[in-house]
């Protein structure tokens, strides 16, 4: 039934309910993730894809990511437990030394370019709403997923051994894994897929129907609040063998329980 909603009737089920908490966090739906499915969302999505979330931007920030990973490893090594804080400067006239073409600069540039556009202008609230999506929706989910992945590996010595062997065989004495190595680590990738399956960070996905449609002989009226249970889908015993077990091998092609997931 979820497939009907997410594939066959994806347009009808692509609305987002205007829940009070989300509206507060997103300056009344000025973001991308919680904005209703309309021309504004399409425009915002285009801005994000064109200026923020594309292969060239991902490539551009590679040195920043590598720098952060190195610092994280050093921090873990030094077993430091002091709390860290960060202040975000949202002043367009930020001191020059802070301007390194980061995500905030990109959003300011978009704002400048669109200053004349009266229909879909880009205000300070738009910038804050998109930043909220990135900081709340992207950083915490990624960090918590990594925590789950490491916990799953620690609790499964067989998996730990296979993962260590794969990494050691690939990098030898190099001493670190860089982004070019990632495509050559299928078992590590399978560990992440299995973690997404067992510990999804967005287990229940709220949607709102944009217009009425028929599913399984039932009429679902427009503006119906729908909760999609991703957690149950990824543990469905009719699809997954030993659904509660952490077994990355199910994502390695050739394994008897192999399932393709892209
Ligand atoms: C492990 C990491 C992540 C998890 C578990 C996660 C989870 C989710 C979920 C469950 C949704 C809702 C999907 C839906 O309603 O169909 C979503 C949407 C979204 N996520 Fe993530 N996310 C992750 C990382 C990221 C990152 C790194 C970014 C951006 C840098 C990001 C940006 C977004 C955006 C913009 C949307 C809204 C998409 C749209 O409305 O079309 N997420 N995410």
Image: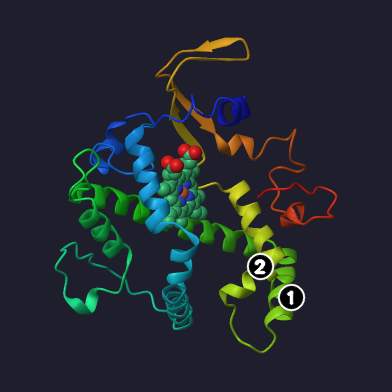
Q: How is the image coloured?
A: rainbow
Query: Please, is residue 208 above or below residue 57 in the view?
Result: above
Frontmost residue, 112 versus 35: 112
Q: Nearer the viewer, residue 73 or 82?
A: 73
| Residue at the (66%, 39%) spot, across then down | 235
Q: Give coordinates of residue 218: x percent, y percent.
A: 57, 10
Q: Is residue 210 left or right of residue 250?
A: left
- Nearer the N terminus, badge 1 or badge 2? 1
Few, some or many residues within 10 Å of mark 1 (<14, 14–19, 20+): few
Taking 215 as reference, is 58 above or below it?
A: below
Determine whether the residue tagged by mark 1 lies in a helix, strand or loop: helix
Distance Cα–Cα, label 1 vs label 2: 16 Å
Q: Quadrant of residue 169?
A: bottom right
Task: Look at the image and tell me in which quarter the N terminus lies.
Answer: top right
Residue 123 shown left or right of residue 52 in the figure: left
The residue at the point 32 percent across, 63 percent down is 103
Residue that mark 1 sits on: 165
Mark 1 CB in 8 Å range of ligand 1?
no
Quarter of the view holding residue 158 = bottom right
Residue at image mark 2: 183
Q: 80 or 6: nearer the eye?
A: 6
Q: Position of residue 248 (x, y in %)?
A: 71, 56
Residue 115 appears in the picture as rendered: yes
């Amino acid at each position: 039934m979820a497939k009907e909603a997410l594939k066959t009737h994806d347009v009808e089920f692509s609305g987002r309910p205007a829940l009070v908490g989300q509206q507060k966090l997103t300056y009344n739906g000025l973001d991308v993730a919680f904005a209703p499915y309309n021309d504004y969302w399409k425009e915002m999505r285009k801005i994000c894809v064109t200026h923020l979330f594309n292969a060239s931007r991902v490539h551009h920030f590679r040195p920043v990511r590598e720098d952060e990973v190195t610092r994280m490893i050093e921090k873990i090594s030094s077993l430091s437990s002091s709390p860290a804080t960060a202040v975000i400067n949202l002043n367009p006239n930020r001191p020059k030394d802070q301007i390194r073409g980061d995500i905030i600069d990109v959003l300011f540039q978009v704002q400048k370019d669109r200053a004349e556009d009266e229909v879909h202008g880009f205000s300070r609230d738009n910038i804050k709403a998109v930043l909220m999506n990135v900081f709340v929706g992207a950083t915490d989910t990624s960090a918590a997923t990594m925590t789950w992945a490491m916990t799953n590996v620690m609790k499964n010595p067989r998996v730990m051994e296979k993962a260590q062997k794969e990494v050691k065989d690939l990098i030898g004495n190099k001493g670190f894994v860089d982004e070019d190595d990632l495509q050559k680590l299928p078992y590590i990738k399978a560990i992440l897929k299995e973690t997404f399956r067992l510990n999804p960070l967005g287990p229940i996905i709220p949607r709102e129907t944009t217009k009425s449609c028929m599913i399984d002989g039932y009429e679902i009226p427009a503006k119906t609040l729908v909760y999609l249970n991703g957690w149950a889908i990824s543990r469905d015993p009719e699809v997954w063998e030993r659904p509660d077990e952490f077994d990355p091998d199910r994502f390695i092609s050739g394994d008897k329980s192999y399932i393709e997931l892209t």
